[in-house]
Image (cartoon, coloured by chain):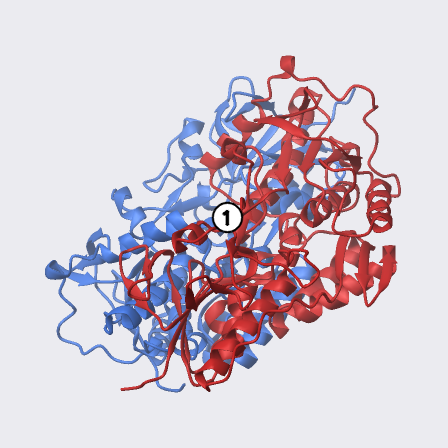
Chain colours: A blue, B red
Amino acid sequence: MTDRKKVVIVGGGFGGLWAAQALANKPVDVTLVDRKNHHVFQPLLYQVATAVLSPGEIAQPIRRILHSAKNIEVILGEVVGFDLMNNSALLEDGSEVGFDYLIVAAGARHAYFGHDDWEVSAPGLKTIEDAVEIRSRVLLAFEMAERDAYLKGAYDPLNFIVVGGGPTGVELAGAIADIATQALANDFKAIDTRKARVILFEGSDRVLGTFTPDLSESAKSQLESLGVEVRLNSYVDDIAPGRVKVGGEWIHCDVVLWATGVAASSLGKQLGVETDKAGRVFVEPDLSLPGHPNIFVIGDMASIKQANGEPVPGVSPAAMQMGTTTAKNILAELKGKPRNEFEYVNKGSMATIGRKKAIADVFGLKLKGFVAWVFWLVLHVFFLIGFRNRFLVLTDWFWAYMTRERSARLITGDAEELREAIKFLKAKPASEVVSTSSRQPKSINSNR
Amino acid sequence: MTDRKKVVIVGGGFGGLWAAQALANKPVDVTLVDRKNHHVFQPLLYQVATAVLSPGEIAQPIRRILHSAKNIEVILGEVVGFDLMNNSALLEDGSEVGFDYLIVAAGARHAYFGHDDWEVSAPGLKTIEDAVEIRSRVLLAFEMAERDAYLKGAYDPLNFIVVGGGPTGVELAGAIADIATQALANDFKAIDTRKARVILFEGSDRVLGTFTPDLSESAKSQLESLGVEVRLNSYVDDIAPGRVKVGGEWIHCDVVLWATGVAASSLGKQLGVETDKAGRVFVEPDLSLPGHPNIFVIGDMASIKQANGEPVPGVSPAAMQMGTTTAKNILAELKGKPRNEFEYVNKGSMATIGRKKAIADVFGLKLKGFVAWVFWLVLHVFFLIGFRNRFLVLTDWFWAYMTRERSARLITGDAEELREAIKFLKAKPASEVVSTSSRQPKSINSNR
């Protein structure tokens, strides 16, 4: 009926979605397969985890985003492997999706350096479900302390530990300190939420190591001004329910969040080529799979170097650019034109630290504090998918800014889960646990 | 230290919350215990189930609502029983909360008439978690049909069944018909969502049986104008995955929702007094427990008659009034004044049916259609807890109204859950299942 080529895209993250958008209403048939029905605006995921935004504000159904593209079909399904001989992708129920071109953009998850058992105690932040889980744990910790204080007349001071000083770790640590000192302070009566400690452990000698050293230093100061204790050169040796072992010492904690380590989707290994230690596929300069010019691997799953010899970073702008380049290369090839090699354009980078705090390295400018934060805010709202979401997120931010309230403070889960959570939080074997001795628990912040 | 009396409230629904608000900053110490951290504005729960609103828009942390009441402590916990001899409530972990006065307001859930095994196949709608589960099932049904149509070139027409023609059943049926014809129609390409059937089964001879017969008749017509098939005098005999047995005939369906039957919280039975068949406690005219004048049972848990001999209905205004009356009686008694008997003031009732469709019986007026819907809208926004939520809900409604989009269309759950759901939906044993034979599957609505 048609000799139009068929492009299958695996994954509706930034890479897959940008590829799809560049192929919209072009002379190809596109099928995008994702195991979720929604695209997540990952840069704001930490705001769901810390109760500022609702899941629906940063996620949008993929088929809604692409609904005006008449040549794109969106399918809910999990790709579990490939039949490279017959050019088809295999779904979880055994069905096959044939392709002429394949774009694999299944992203990455956090990795536990061989300690997958730590995940139960220390969740990471990649999906809406992760964010809702983290939100529940953080809020539940405050609730259980209030309950202890009320029922027993005493409570253990709250400790929140964030492992990893990259962008996600810094955002989470700053936002939890914000919550404790601002949003929750007036609502809890038996406990002083402002006495909660937030400790950020980073293995290297600075946070936000991809920025320049002076910006890292600024980020550390800004975190500390929020009350976060930043511990550099600190490796986590072990994690158990209610405690974390750092430098041979067990530290009691109520919530541990994991914000370090990346493992590319295991689909990379299904492609039968070499991958790096994190499971990223070594791709050709045009992002194609060695030996398979009709298959592309993009985004966090691709390992490729920039012209300067540095690896292309695993950030959303790189994934978007890879998606667009790949789509253009396919369209060029169908017109008999040559492909272009992928070239990463670094448009600068920024990281937010807390309310009115951030760092940015853009257009050759190094910005710190409030100015950087405004930059961050404008850009993130601008790129947020969908006008309605932009509007709602701005509304919520404005509301939070004016009232210092957090709007999305739901703990969901049934009674059984609550009982489990209580048991879990009470599992802290106090006798084995020492508090970090040298420092007095201090109030996170005093400007109530 | 203080001889202030202590009031313990079990449950933060309309009854418990209204009692707490009437006791705010009065000379008593109040403790409100709920197993969730949030109060849910139940009248809009069906809008979360049908992807119009996000959970955070109709739920608010109880401690946030009560944060300015200096004499009220909010505790997250599940009351599992009482020690009536010693005036204390027992929590799930064995701890006790002593009281001088106790207000039991733990609400009700849907009941399956002795067929609790039906719940897996036919969820009801009482909590945020229920609503998110229903939303996932409804959206997933469309997704799986699209996937079948794409992968196999064919799909079974979608059938949604709602059991029960009370307010919740009518709201759900109308809203699902709305979704299918409006919000989703442009986003699905392989299937025609407008061909989905929505069938509402009601055991009696009319829907919304608490209204006058002519309003019931109007509601039925309005439902039918949305494309809902209303089957009166139809009892469900059995429910199994993917099918429902009505009048001896198995009907295939993709989603069944349960909107009939009420069972009061099992805490009623823990009070050691007589209950009715639905587990409601027969209370004294002042809502106190027979033999225990310091214990009150209110809201959906209380069985009490109006002056006219009719039972007080299980609706939110009744629960609110009971909460307020009880609080006032406690405060009066502490001043040495007599208690008042509870008197239910019926301020009218209304039920919404779909976009711009409703019925209302207020101030002696019987309203139908658009006028009734505007009434419904204004009142529900007015009563919604919290200014921010009012504003956001209005924004979302306005957006949905202008664009016919649904904003909160997330299917959440991990890959494992997705696989289970697919298996579940595919469990329909086609051979045993007959379609309702006499009627042609018809398009729900044509005014696209």
Would residue A210 be seen by someone viewing this image from the given angle?
A: no
Q: Position of residue A103 (x, y in %)?
A: 56, 35
Q: Position of residue B363 (x, y in %)?
A: 82, 68
Q: Which residue in the rendered view is the most extreme toward the right? A: B447
Q: Please tell me in which quadrant of the rendered image residue B381 appears.
A: bottom right
User: With A344 as the anchor, is A17 left or right in this view?
Assistant: right
Question: Front-most of A309 and A272?
Answer: A272
Question: Front-most of B31 and A47?
Answer: B31
* Identity of the residue drawn at 15% across and 61% down: A430
Which quadrant is the C terminus of chain B positioned in? top right
Question: Front-most of A60 and A100?
Answer: A60
Q: Please tell me in which quadrant of the rendered image residue B434 appears.
A: top right
Crowding at mark 1 (Cα within 10 Å: few <14, some 14-19, many 20+):
many
* Identity of the residue drawn at 81% across and 43% down: B223
Question: Front-most of A307 and A443?
Answer: A443
Q: Which residue is mark 1?
A: B279
User: With A128 as the anchor, is A188 left or right in this view?
Assistant: left
